[in-house]
Amino acid sequence: MSVPDSRISTHLILQAGQADRQYWRDLWRYRELLLILAWRDVTVRYKQTVVGIAWAFIRPFLTTVVFTVVFGHIAKIQTNEAVPYAIVVIGGLLPWTLFSSVLGDASGSVIANSNLIGKVYFPRLIVPLATVLVVVIDFAVSLSILAGLMIWYRVVPGWQILLLPFFLMLALLASLGPAIWAAAVIVKYRDFRFVVPFVLQFGLYVSPVGFPSSVVPERWRMLYNLNPMVGIIDGFRWCIVGGDSPIYWPGFALSLAVTAFFLWLGVGTFRRIERSFADMI
Amino acid sequence: MANSAIRAEGLGKKFIIGHKVEQGGLLREAMTSGAKALLRRGADFLKGRARNISGQTEEFWALRDLSFDIRPGELVSIIGHNGAGKSTLLKILSRITEPTLGRVEINGRVNSLLEVGTGFHPELSGRENIFLNGAILGMSRSEMRQRFDDIVDFAGVAKFIDTPVKRYSVGMYVRLAFAVAAHLEAEILIVDEVLSVGDAEFQAKCINRMSQVADTGRTVLFVSHNFAAVSALTKRSLVLQAGRLTFDGPVEAGLAYYTESLGKSGKERYWGRGKDSTIVSAKLVDAAGAPTESFVSGTPLRLRVVVETSGMRGTSLELILRDQHNLPIAFYSSATFSNVPIPAQAGRYECVLSLDSYFLAAGEYNIDLQTTSTGIVVDHHVDGAVQFFVNACNPGEVAFDFRQDQGTGHLAMKLSAPLLFMPVEADQQTG
């Protein structure tokens, strides 16, 4: 007779509304599944492609070039002369790509894994979280563009660069809230499959990706920071070029509050709907 | 230690079912329902609340007032018609869906095999899929590493372990999938219909493995239409009918009870619905098109079937012919065998499926009908949709009644060319 595995609970009560009392503990127990699903997605993603993971580099690189030419040279947006425009762009593009990939991939993840959800139990939050891991790997690859540009333009980062992981965390949290919310709601309302790409396309222009947020008039800045990515992109740029791209702190606080709100809404909605995922999918 | 492995009290599960075939047509929906309903629905979805459109939906109890108690180490089979609630019960026990009413107490780690190969990814190799599948079923990597060799051995795919499973034959795929599932650790094992795959040899191996598992004192819950396996593996059976537990007792009595109910159930039971297609009704008809329950051997087998479809492309109408022991003996698929899928336009269709003349042995038969999308995924399956019997089978001129229970099979074969016995000279025999 085998020894029961102590990791998995051996006493369980299933009842309406409390089938998952130990949810967060289960989530921790299933952390290996999280890693394995992420590994699966990474492995499968670049199968049968010629350049493979280089795609994670090519896309943001070309976007940087285009944005630098369009905003910096054609539209001639005013910026601090001390900072090369390409650095401004990549500082905005990296967090934005992170945000849009998480929202885009995670929101469809529950539907994409419907065969699993209808057949096996595991905490469903694993599914969108696994896609986040995949995005982080791509992000790590595209960081090399930043490094390359900083060497090319001889930009020496200050102590602020050490705070980059903190802002990376914030960017993840900011994208996770809406992503989890959308992932859950899409199960019932497939309409959101059309809404999410639209929001992302729109968001690219209302977020300070191709331009610094300082071009926004002072009296609108608070309102502008309702977009949580504004504070986070500002933070990224501040990490990279330090005092030359100051953070607007009241706005940053507002961005944080909006992030927290979406996270609360996302997790709450997901937890409420996930119990009936299998019935709807 | 509690003295039951699974204890269910007053278990119930309610579904809200829609009555429209073309659900999910976003634009149409938006145009037909009023602006007020749209607004209300908008408010609903922001909060993630269930959608409620009165008049178009209906409550349906898949399970009702189910109570049973299974002790550790018991081997229990669950039998019942399609739509009787078996799958729903298994889904509740394996935590995929939660009950609407009542409660279940479970003592022990549950491992459920609701479908072999769940989560297999075609692009990944056999080795990679073993670990992926193991993780999905709740095993750690170190546990999987310990069992890896046993799994590969059992499946007999050692040579192809680093080949992507999309290059596997169906048999290899299924063997590997079952092997992973059969080597998992659990005190309670829930098995749904996995033995209906693979060749006879592999099935025997599976049944063998299952009884080994059972011998180690684990609790096994087993769902199958393979009555031979059910009676070989389990000692007690629960019979579900229309969501209620109608029998709980020794397996032989349970099977007898079920077989009897198959005979008289007939028309009124609810066949359930598929996601994109639904088999509404099916009848055996004679040459004149009148419904009948007896089939004359050697004449075409005619079924009048009504199906509903949401317009999914490439959906196949399929039938499985089963003998009196419920073992499958023949199969037909409209899309794969005759290249005639169900029309790709939403609506309700009637067809007469007229199959070649067979000399079926005398006895009872029943036919499962199912719709299958994209060639693999069964969308709607109806067990024993049609029952019929063959009174006599006399394929030749000599009076001889060929019967199922003679143990010589189900099909009397006919010659395609005259059979001639030619004399052979003694010295030519070695050549």
Image (cartoon, coloured by chain):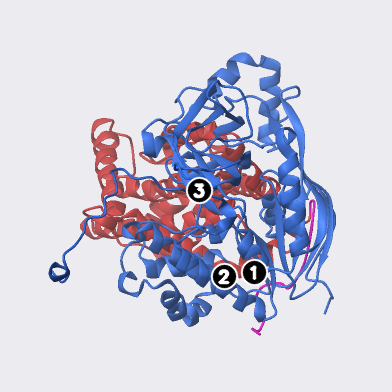
Chain colours: A red, B blue
Left-right relation of A58 to B7: left
Kindly identify which residue carries mark 3.
A109
Q: Which element carries disc 3, helix, strand or loop?
A: helix
Can residue A10 be found in the magenta stretch?
Answer: yes
Q: Amino acid at mark 2?
A: Ile
Is residue B160 something one can see in this rendering? yes
Left-right relation of A251 to A144: right
The structure residue drawn at horizontal position 64% and vertical position 46%, both measured from the top left corner, is A277
Note whether B333 is above or below A127 in the view shown.
above
- Is the residue marked by circle 1 packed among few (<14), some (14-19), or many (20+) residues within 10 Å? few
Q: Which element carries disc 2, helix, strand or loop?
A: helix
Note whether A11 is above or below A143 in the view shown.
below
- Image-quadrant location for residue B232: bottom right
Left-right relation of A90 to A280: left
Q: Pinpoint residue A79: horizontal percent, then vertical percent.
A: 34, 41
Residue situated in front as seen by the camera: A191 or A241: A191
Q: Pinpoint residue B96: horizontal percent, then vertical percent.
A: 66, 54
The structure residue drawn at horizontal position 64% and vertical position 34%, both measured from the top left corner, is B293
Q: Pinpoint residue B329: horizontal percent, then vertical percent.
A: 50, 50
**Image marks 1 and 2: residues in contact by CB distance under 8 Å:** yes
Kindly identify which residue carries mark 1.
B232
Q: Amino acid at mark 1?
A: Ala
| Stretch in magenta | A1-17
